[in-house]
Amino acid sequence: MRHSDKIPNLQESMKMGLAVGLEDGVRTLKGSYIIHLVDSDTGEVLHHSEHSNIVTLDGGVLVMINLASGGTPVPPSQRGITMLAVGTGATGPVLNPDAPDPRQRHLNAEIARKPFSTTVFRNGVGAAVSYPTNVCDFTVTFGVGEAVGPLNEMGLVRSISLNPAVLNPVPATFPAYDPTVDLTLYDILANYTTMGQGTGPIGKPNNSVLTLTWRLSS
């Protein structure tokens, strides 16, 4: 069976595997994600894992920007999350990168970003629905020849430009964090994670397909 024949059902089961948690009692923005790497020629699963992640300090600012936009036209600075970015610059040991920090404002060594292939709302039992809920899955697929390398960091980005090749990072060096920076002028890193704690980077070969599903809930 070809990889393209198998992935839709597999993606659906992957998404359903993440805990929805609609009835927690306390509503706080949180995220989790699935990494699924497949050999494009044989369909062999090279890597599959599920993790939780952090919401950055700038992610909280993005929420306020959107809430404060009211009924005005939405310029680039008031968009929601637009892309998922991956990189190779996580700090710390190669086989055990540092845990993510909410002060992070951009990837340390971004190598690729891409708009979402699907954005799906889910109800309290994890089923996809046609109306907005407080749980949303953002999925991106990097195909053959894309995002090739030892990936160890990624994040959800509100980009100023809708062209993935145009970056507008916040001019900051981690761990410094200046809350007075006007984020309407820059790409906002809303969620950030480092990958490969204890195992090393997620190596993406040229002939592989990497599907990343990131779930946000509140």
Image: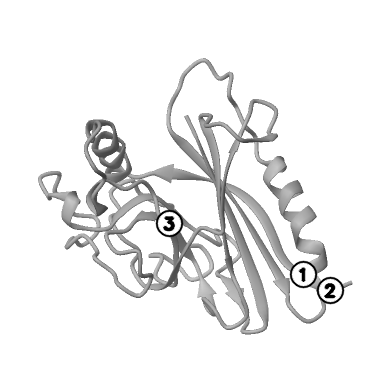
- Give the amino acid at mark 3: Gly
Looking at the rendered structure, the secondary structure element under dot 1 is helix
- Residue 155: which disc? 3
Q: Which residue is mark 1?
A: 4
Q: Are marks 1 and 2 in contact (CB under 8 Å)?
A: yes
In the picture, the quarter occupied by the N terminus is: bottom right
Image point 78% across, 82% down: which residue? 41
Image point 81% across, 63% down: which residue? 6
Q: Residue furthest right?
A: 1
Report the front residue among 216 and 128: 128
Question: Which corner quadrant of the image does residue 203 belong to?
Answer: bottom right
- Residue 67 versus residue 35 in the image, above or below: above
Residue 177: tell me if it is visible: no
Residues packed near mark 1 inside 10 Å, few (<14), some (14 to 19) or many (20 plus): few
Q: Are marks 1 and 3 in contact (CB under 8 Å)?
A: no
Real-space Cα distance between discs 1 and 2?
5 Å
Q: Earlier in the sequence, mark 1 or mark 3?
A: 1
Real-space Cα distance between discs 1 and 3?
26 Å
Q: Residue furthest left?
A: 180
Between label 3 and label 2, give the one nearer the viewer: 2
Residue 65 appears left or right of 158 = left
Q: Which residue is mark 2?
A: 2
Residues packed near mark 2 inside 10 Å, few (<14), some (14 to 19) or many (20 plus): few
- Give the amino acid at mark 2: Arg
- Give the amino acid at mark 1: Ser
Report the front residue among 175 and 71: 71
Q: Earlier in the sequence, mark 3 or mark 2?
A: 2
Looking at the rendered structure, the secondary structure element under dot 2 is loop
